Amino acid sequence: MRLVELPDTLAERITCLIQPVLQPDRAADLLEAGRADLRSRWQVVLAQLADWKSDSGQLEDEGVVAPTSALLSFAEDVAEVLCANSVEPPDNLLTNGDGGVVFRWRLSGRTWSIELDSDGTIESSLMAGSRLLWRHSLHEHAADST
């Protein structure tokens, strides 16, 4: 008997990570015109990911591991799910130096990030200054380890 339903799809996994951060009625308030504008703003993020994917060497530096093409494709999928969930595009898109990608938002004294690691882990955290308010991680194939 399963006591907790584990998210199976990428959309379910991302929804699990964004629910504590987003305002619950926000998506219902967006008009169709707002959705088109939101999609066009996400295109900047998707273009950056595509640029990195076409030349990941630009991200390499001494001691810095560039994300793989597969991880960058995964980041594109995550961006599409975030856009579909009416999440504003991040203020920053960066690499973490260990082969991962970080989406980062700055919101009135708080920083929210979603980090995709090369091992398949997705972590979302919310910080107020240097104080951690909330963090949640989802690991690829977590159900297999039980």
Image (tube, rainbow, N blue to C red):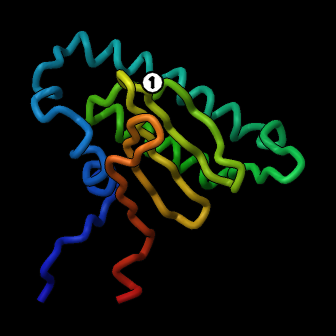
In this view, 120 is above or below 37: below
Q: Amino acid at mark 1?
A: Trp
| Residue depicted at 69% across the width and 56% down the height | 98
Choose between 26 and 107: the one closer to the eye: 107
Residue 66: x and y, percent? 75, 49
In this view, 85 is above or below 16: above
Which quadrant of the view contains residue 126?
top left
| Residue depicted at 26% across the width and 36% down the height | 85
Residue 107: x and y, percent? 37, 25
Residue 112: x and y, percent? 40, 37
In this view, 73 is above or below 86: below
Screen quadrant of the C terminus? bottom left
| Residue depicted at 31% across the width and 15% down the height | 36
Screen quadrant of the N terminus? bottom left
Choose between 18 and 130: the one closer to the eye: 130
Residue at the right extreme of this rendering: 62
Tell me, yes or no, if residue 68 can be seen here: no
Q: Give the class, few, some or many, for how many residues have Cα within 10 Å of label 1's Cα (few <14, many ≥20).
A: some
76 with respect to 59 (left or right) = left
Choose between 74 and 97: the one closer to the eye: 97
Residue 24: x and y, percent? 13, 35
Which quadrant of the view contains residue 42?
top left
In this view, 36 is above or below 50: above
Q: What residue is pinned by disc 1?
A: 42
